[in-house]
């Protein structure tokens, strides 16, 4: 699972002899998304639980599809019934234009044929738009995982009614897997633009992970009881789940 190591600096040290910057901090998730429904409906099934690993495209939650399917069936039927009306109106207009060119039809009659086609085509286009909406609603009745990750928390229950237009509360919180990031604090004397791209080692107990500095803050932050400092991020890959808030030691090679 993709996680982030957020390192709140407990201690900072720099050893000229070893040319390394050592930081202490904590782990956190690399990327966390809070998924909500895109359409309103009743939660029918929840297919995952907290702590479960998922793959991109896996169904996490399913809303009751009966109303969405009924809407789509109705839209398809209406579209099918209106198509012949448009085709007939088109033929009638073509016939009217021929008669008008031969001075066998009045301009009023021609305009009437044009209006009939316009009205029929308008109703047909509305039916098509309604079909597209129905297809969208049916497709989004299922919440799927946007990436390989791990479920952090499920915030809903089966049979609950959800409406994203009323509430933006998430239904499922998901974190990416495979990659982590370390965020540490350095002081103004340690800040150096050349730190970007430097290799680093993240130590968690007896485990060590190789990483790289991929972010260097330009805005000072002020932790509690500490002098203003700057954030520095170290990203690295993992092949196992590591919880958030785990203490780690980071060594950035100068």
Image: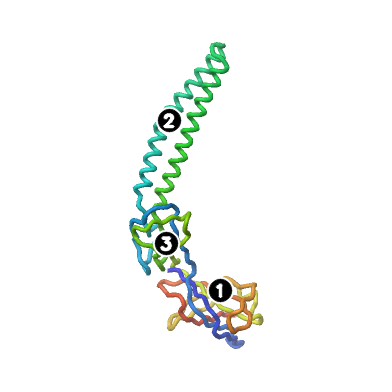
The circle on residue 171 is 3
Between 7 and 48, the residue placed more toward the observer is 48
Question: Residue placed at 35% from the left, 52% from the top?
Answer: 64
Mark 3: few/some/many CA within 10 Å (<14, 14-19, 20+)? many
Residue 161 quadrant: bottom left
Q: Which residue is mark 2?
A: 83
Q: CA distance from mark 3 to mark 1?
A: 29 Å
State whether residue 153 appears in this view. Answer: yes
State whether residue 59 appears in this view. Answer: no
Tag 1 or tag 3, which sits nearer the N-term?
Answer: 3
For this view, does 250 lie left or right of residue 158?
A: right
Q: Is the residue 23 above or below the residue 49 in the image?
A: below
Q: Which residue is mark 1?
A: 233
Q: Position of residue 253 (x, y in %)?
A: 57, 80
Q: Secondary structure at mark 2?
A: helix
* Label 2–label 1 contact, CB within 8 A: no
Q: Position of residue 190 (x, y in %)?
A: 63, 81
Query: Which residue extends farthest right?
Result: 189
For this view, does 234 lie left or right of residue 155?
A: right
């Amino acid at each position: 699972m993709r996680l982030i190591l957020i390192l709140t600096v407990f201690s900072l040290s720099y050893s000229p002899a070893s040319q390394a910057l050592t930081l202490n901090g904590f782990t956190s998730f690399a990327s966390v998304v809070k998924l909500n429904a895109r359409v309103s409906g009743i939660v029918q099934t929840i297919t995952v639980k907290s702590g479960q690993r998922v793959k991109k495209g896996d169904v996490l939650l399913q809303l009751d599809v009966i109303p969405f399917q009924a809407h789509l069936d109705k839209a398809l039927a209406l579209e099918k019934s209106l198509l012949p009306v448009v085709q007939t109106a088109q033929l009638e207009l073509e016939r009217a234009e021929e008669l008008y060119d031969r001075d066998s039809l009045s301009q009023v009659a021609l305009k009437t044929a044009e209006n009939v086609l316009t009205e029929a085509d308008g109703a047909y286009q509305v039916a098509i738009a309604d079909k597209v909406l129905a297809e969208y609603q049916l497709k989004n009745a299922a919440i799927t995982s946007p990436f390989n990750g791990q479920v952090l928390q499920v915030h809903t229950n089966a049979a609950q009614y959800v409406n994203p237009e009323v509430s933006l509360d998430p239904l499922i919180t998901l974190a990416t897997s495979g990659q982590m990031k370390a965020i540490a604090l350095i002081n103004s004397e340690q800040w150096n633009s050349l730190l970007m791209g430097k290799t680093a080692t993240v130590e968690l107990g007896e485990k060590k992970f190789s990483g790289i500095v991929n972010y260097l803050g330009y805005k000072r932050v002020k932790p509690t009881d500490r002098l203003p400092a700057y954030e520095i991020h170290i990203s690295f890959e993992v092949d196992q789940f590591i919880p958030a808030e785990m203490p780690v030691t980071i060594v950035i090679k100068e």
